[in-house]
């Protein structure tokens, strides 16, 4: 694949970023793509691996045929590369922007810390496909007479809906919010992925026959039993939105928020959408000292959003120890390693505190947050006596993950079985729940995870639904 000696001739080169001082002034994407000449050289670095772990079980969840489209880019056959990429991934422009790229960690060249720039090349292929007009609606020439309801329009729901529509089913997507995308739209900031990418996919899907029903909170505004009576199959793909509650003393103080309400508000504001009509107060970081509790992607999104809103300072607390700069390849590769990673948001000026537990939140007599009391922790994550310190804070965002799916409404009303974490019980073979007419995919089934895993599950659930309704399926698994 690529050029046999490419990995020896060319060093790894990734797309660059706008300077931090410039990019924090706006919410637009700030990556600086490579030109075609450099992209071809990067594609040429893909080796002719006997076993390419990049798209195996340890690499890409959707099994992108990475060596194949790297070779096509090297040969300048971009259109065929786009067809190949779309054969395994409905939305490569999403994953090319926001996937953490486990494929690169599993790349053979990562043994030398120089993996192929797979994510950069994937985004370039997807963007070129759109710019050249190669991405077009693919409506089915047949109609099966079967109707499928998809609840939730995040990446799992969108992928399933598109696959099912393309084999001739009548697909209706029910979305609680005014627009499609789920956390792609309301959780991920525009500086990581602008929402125009979602909008044009929705237009493509509508041209393929998918019908979107917005402002429909199934289980609240529309009974579940109406859908199970009206449709031949129902897919639950509503995500895992119930935040994990740290139960911190002082959590009730003014200025303390979960991460998602903050990010949702910001995304609505950037997208010129009205705020929810429940009287919620604006959450803004301008002129404030911000503390973010948590070390994951959601926490990083809060960091970048706070800087763009004009925060005075942003400190991120991570209870885990500071990881090594590099992993031990022989004991970890090709699996996802624990090593020091600095996100683009953290690089914009965040202070990072490792092995830091939050003990309590302090406030003034008016009930307003003033500080965060922390302590260093030992190997068992227990506070070390005498290591306490206080961070001044006007805003705290709790971003320590999700406990599972929201039970009230949809899940309670459906009566389907859930596990002890609150996720819908369904296996990875057929994605069927305890109700024979209901399937589940994405975070609602597996718990909080990556967008690429949601796309995979949506595609596989679509095949299971098609197979059940028709007796066989031509959809890929």
Image (tube, rainbow, N blue to C red):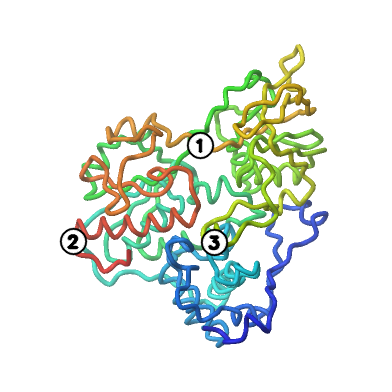
Q: Callout 2: few (<14), some (14-19), or many (20+) C-alpha neighbours within 10 Å? A: few
Q: Callout 1: few (<14), some (14-19), or many (20+) C-alpha neighbours within 10 Å? A: some
- Tell me the CA gap for discs 1 and 3: 28 Å
- In the rendering, which numbered label is found on residue 333? 3
Question: Looking at the image, is 320 positioned above or below residue 117?
Answer: above
Element at label 2? helix
Residue 376: x and y, percent? 71, 30
Which quarter of the image is occupied by the C terminus?
bottom left
- Tell me the CA gap for discs 1 and 2: 36 Å
- In the rendering, which numbered label is found on residue 470? 2
In the figure, is residue 310 to the left or right of 203? right
- Tell me the CA gap for discs 3 and 2: 42 Å
Element at label 3? loop
x 55%, y 58%: residue: 331
Nearest-to-viewer mark from 1 and 2: 1
Task: Please state which of residues 42 and 126 is positioned toward the viewer in this rendering.
Answer: 42
Please tell me in which quadrant of the rendered image residue 255 appears.
top right
Residue 204: x and y, percent? 44, 65
Task: Tell which circle, 1 or 2, labels the residue nearer the N-terminal end.
Answer: 1
Residues marked 1 and 2 touching at CB (< 8 Å): no
Question: Looking at the image, is 388 positioned above or below residue 11?
Answer: above
Question: Looking at the image, is 441 positioned above or below residue 87?
Answer: above
Q: Which residue is mark 1?
A: 402
Q: Callout 3: few (<14), some (14-19), or many (20+) C-alpha neighbours within 10 Å? A: some
Element at label 1? strand
Task: Tell which circle, 3 or 2, labels the residue nearer the N-terminal end.
Answer: 3
- In the rendering, which numbered label is found on residue 346? none
């Amino acid at each position: 694949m690529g050029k046999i000696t490419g990995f020896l001739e060319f060093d790894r080169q990734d797309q660059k970023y706008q300077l931090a001082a410039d990019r924090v002034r706006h919410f637009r994407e700030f990556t600086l793509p490579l030109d075609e000449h450099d992209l071809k050289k990067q594609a040429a670095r893909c080796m002719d691996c006997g076993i390419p772990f990049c798209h195996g079980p340890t690499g890409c969840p959707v099994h992108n045929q990475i060596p194949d489209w790297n070779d096509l880019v090297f040969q300048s056959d971009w259109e065929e590369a786009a067809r190949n990429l779309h054969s395994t991934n409905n939305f490569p422009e999403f994953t090319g922007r926001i996937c953490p790229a486990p494929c690169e960690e599993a790349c053979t060249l990562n043994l030398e810390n120089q993996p192929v720039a797979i994510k950069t090349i994937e985004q370039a292929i997807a963007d070129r496909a759109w710019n050249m007009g190669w991405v077009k609606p693919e409506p089915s020439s047949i109609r099966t007479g079967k109707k499928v309801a998809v609840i939730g329009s995040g990446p799992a729901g969108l992928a399933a809906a598109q696959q099912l529509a393309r084999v001739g089913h009548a697909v209706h997507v029910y979305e609680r919010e005014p627009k499609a995308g789920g956390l792609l739209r309301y959780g991920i900031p525009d500086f990581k992925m602008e929402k125009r990418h979602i909008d044009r996919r929705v237009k493509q899907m509508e041209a393929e026959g998918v019908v979107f029903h917005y402002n429909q909170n199934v289980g609240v505004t529309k009974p579940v039993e109406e859908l199970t009576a009206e449709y031949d199959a129902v897919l639950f793909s509503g995500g895992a939105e119930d935040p994990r509650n740290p139960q911190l003393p002082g959590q009730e103080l003014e200025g303390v928020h979960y991460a998602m309400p903050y990010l949702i508000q910001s995304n609505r504001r950037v997208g010129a959408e009205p705020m929810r009509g429940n009287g919620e107060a604006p959450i803004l970081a301008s002129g404030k000292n911000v503390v973010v509790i948590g070390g994951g992607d959601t926490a990083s999104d809060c960091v970048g959003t706070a800087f763009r809103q004009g925060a005075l300072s942003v400190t991120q607390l991570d209870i885990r120890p500071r990881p090594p700069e590099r992993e031990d390849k022989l004991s970890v590769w090709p699996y996802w390693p624990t090593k020091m990673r600095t996100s683009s948001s953290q690089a914009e000026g965040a202070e990072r505190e490792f092995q830091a537990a939050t003990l309590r939140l302090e406030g003034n007599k008016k009930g307003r947050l003033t500080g965060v009391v922390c302590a260093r922790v030992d190997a068992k994550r227990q506070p070390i006596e005498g290591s306490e310190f206080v961070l001044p804070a006007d805003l705290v965002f709790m971003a320590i993950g999700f406990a599972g799916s929201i039970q009230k409404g949809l899940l309670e009303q459906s009566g389907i079985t859930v596990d002890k974490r609150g996720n819908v019980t369904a296996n990875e073979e057929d994605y069927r729940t305890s109700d024979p007419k209901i399937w589940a995919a994405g975070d609602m089934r597996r718990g909080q995870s990556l967008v690429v895993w949601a796309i995979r599950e949506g595609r596989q659930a679509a095949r299971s639904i098609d197979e059940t309704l028709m007796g066989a399926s031509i959809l890929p698994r």
